[in-house]
Image (cartoon, rainbow, N blue to C red):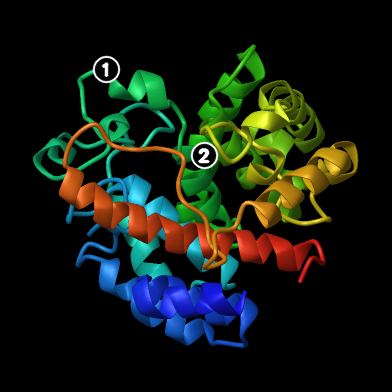
Amino acid sequence: MERAEKWLRRYGRPLELALWEYHLGGGSKERVIQYLSAFQNEDGGFGHGLEADFWLPQSSPIASWMAGQILVEIQAGPEDYIVRRLMDYLMATEQVQPGMWPTVLPENNNYPHAPWWEWTPDAQKDWMFNPSVELAAFLIHWSGSQGLEAALGWMSLRHAFEYLMDADSVEWHGMKNFWQCLKLLRPFQDRFPEEVGFSFAQLEQKARTLILDVISREISGWGITYQPLPLDFVKDPADPLYEELKPLVEENLRVYWESRSEWGIWDITWGWADYPQEFAVARRYWQGILAVDRYKLFKAFGWI
């Protein structure tokens, strides 16, 4: 762990170092906000390679979703200016279909990016409610389920949950979004029947079923190929899936623990088709992101 921190200090982004200090070293929320603000644009959205696999400088829903996840982690609220501006961006950004902010923008193609972030006219059919279901949850969470922000959030979720309840399967990144949405909105579960037409319990059970279907159980490939692992969904022992997945979660933790490099970090399991020089930089950024995320998991499950 000490070597991983040294690596971050030498090679990581200031943002990941601030997150490391916040989660693992008693650092402040304000320091995280300071470095996260560097990725925020005048319109309140985020860009500039915050999501390291595409380097679009202008605001995008995906980069703004990544920022929102960080802000939720550090318990930022609407009293924080960075949050208020992010909500303004979501309110002002037109949805491409009911409940869907555009996942990929045409401008992505003008900057270095991974192949999955290539914009095509049909891109939204593949991405569907990823990440919109979480963006909608942010609006409800930070508004306290009151006002215009909450109204847009609930409207967006109505369409997303209709899709979920009709689906036989959902791409696993999208299921991560749905699961995080439900965890974030658990305090408002009594509102669900009125607002979205389904009970919270119905939605949680459907999400649980789809997640259990999609999680990889081929342990030999964990950490070697890019696939959905238990710890992509279960972030702490309070997660509703934890008891059911406890043996797999423990195995996932063991795989992460034993696969650390001599620096105490991990390499990524994906690559880009083009832009080799830029990918080398993105790879380094992702190593820092993974280091923070995985040591947070070790802490949450009592391994450190």
Q: Residue at x 64, y 65 (%)?
A: 295
Observer-nearest residue: 94 or 237? 237
Q: Quadrant of the N terminus?
A: bottom right
Give x and y (percent) for residue 228.
60, 33
Examine the rendered structure and indicate whether residue 117 appears above or below residue 91: above
* Residue farthest to the right, as pictured: 243
Q: Is residue 164 left or right of 134 when viewed as pictured?
A: right
Q: Quadrant of residue 7?
A: bottom left
Image height check: is 147 above or below 214? below
Q: Which residue is mark 2?
A: 133
Q: Is residue 47 left or right of residue 242?
A: left
What numbered label is drawn on residue 122?
Answer: 1
Amino acid type of the residue tagged 1 in the rendering? Asp
The answer to which of marks 2 and 1 sits earlier in the sequence is 1
Q: Secondary structure at mark 2?
A: helix
The residue positioned 53% from the left and 24% from the top of the image is 171
| Residue at the spot 20% in from the left edge and 20% down from the top edge | 121
Judge whether residue 119 can be spotted in this image: yes
Residue contact at pointers 2 and 1, CB within 8 angstroms: no
Label 1, secondary structure: give it: loop
Place of residue 297 in the rendered image (x, y in percent of width and height, measured from the top left): 69, 60
Residue 158 seen: no
x%, y% of residue 193? 73, 34
| Kind of residue at badge 2 | Val
